Amino acid sequence: MSQFDFIVIGAGIAGASVAAELSATAKVALLEMEDRPGYHTTGRSAAAYEPNYGPPPFVALTRASGSFFFNTPKGFCDAPLFTKRGSLVLVPKSAAAARHEYLTDMHGVQQIGPHEIQKLYPIIRHDYAAHGFYSSDTGDLDVHGLHQGFLRQFRQQGGKLFVSAPVKAIWRIAHTWQVDAPQGTITAPVVVNAAGAWGDRVAKLAGAIPIGLQAKRRSVGVVPMADYPDVMNWPFVVDVNETWYAKPQSGKLLVSPADETPVEPHDAYADDLALAEGIERFTQATTVEVNRLEHSWGGLRSFTPDGSPAVGYDKAVEGFFWLVGQGGNGIMTAPAMARVAAALATHAPVPDDILAAGLRVAEISPARFGK
């Protein structure tokens, strides 16, 4: 039997980052059901930093994470985590009046016309966009570097990582959790549920009432762009109704229908029909002919009923801490999310800089679901 102060279930970006924070002052076990951390959602991210995207809690956490990405602590990783790349929201002529709220409470966003769009995105069809919204404050994130940096920090601080460790049972005796994994029984006063799409299943094992997490599949295809040598200079592009997006990566384009298909938690794969529809929308908007995909993949994004994350202790189950529902925003919010979660888990004040970025703790509390 191994005794710890915290057991973190799930070694994706949420679990790895909070485990790194907690292990600075506590003995922490990190359990991953797969044979390597980050196999599901974390390893299949589009890897963008967008400080204006998502519900208010995500916007606040993303903005509060910016300083970590721009000025990464020495020794955390070997290469920069952030590479600047603009983002462009296209408003098709068929939706010319759509979403003018893009200019409301948005940092660094400007409305531009067709001529400016053509300069930024030379493959756009001249008659496609009525106007667009451009931000120069966005960029690419090194997901692998970020994830491995947190895992390295966790290990250096004495944390213990268990892989191929699916949780078989969880029970509580005398204010202490007993977690049964293939490696044996691991104990701690607190269990942190960072199991992503499997979060409600972990909750049931612990006797907690599920929040109502919904896993949703996202499909991505890789389009070869050998005829476009300047592709890496283009911005991240999405249409205003989020029916497709395209992001340069390694001299190619990642193209997605931005699908959010409800599914059961599983090893996700691309939805061929949804991907074909997304590619069709992309080709209708651009002059690129897509004759083949180099490959494709699917990822899972998990959502709470109101779309914002659940971070905090369960009201009814002693020592059970929720850290779920990142909804595709887990990478760009990870540094701040981990600091908030670690503060709440240790009953410490939430850092002032994160509150100053606009986070309202009540908006992420599991208590809003009665949990």
Image (tube, helix red, strand yellow):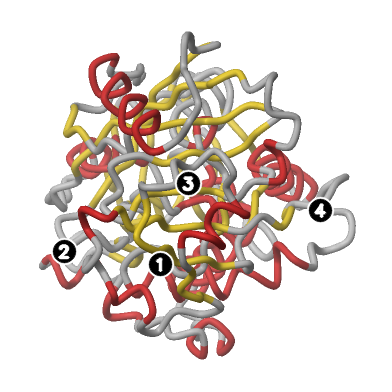
Specify which label sits upstream in the sequence, 1 or 3: 3
Residue corresponding to mark 1: 58
Q: CA distance from mark 4 to mark 2?
A: 35 Å
Residue corresponding to mark 3: 8
Who's the residue at 31% across and 32% down the image? Answer: 281
Q: CA distance from mark 1 to mark 2?
A: 20 Å
Q: CA distance from mark 4 to mark 1?
A: 24 Å
Indicate which label's residue lies in the foreground, 4 or 2.
4
**Residue 23 in the image, given as x and y percentages of width and height:** 65, 57
**Residue 228 in the image, given as x and y percentages of width and height:** 68, 28
> In front: 197, or 237?
237
Residue corresponding to mark 2: 371
Who's the residue at 45% across and 76% down the image? Answer: 60
In the picture, the disc for residue 76 is 4
Left/right placement of residue 190 relative to residue 348 reads: left
Q: Residues within 10 Å of mark 3 (few under 14, many from 20)?
A: many
SS label for mark 3: strand
Tell me the amino acid under the disc marked 4.
Answer: Phe
Q: CA distance from mark 3 to mark 2?
A: 19 Å
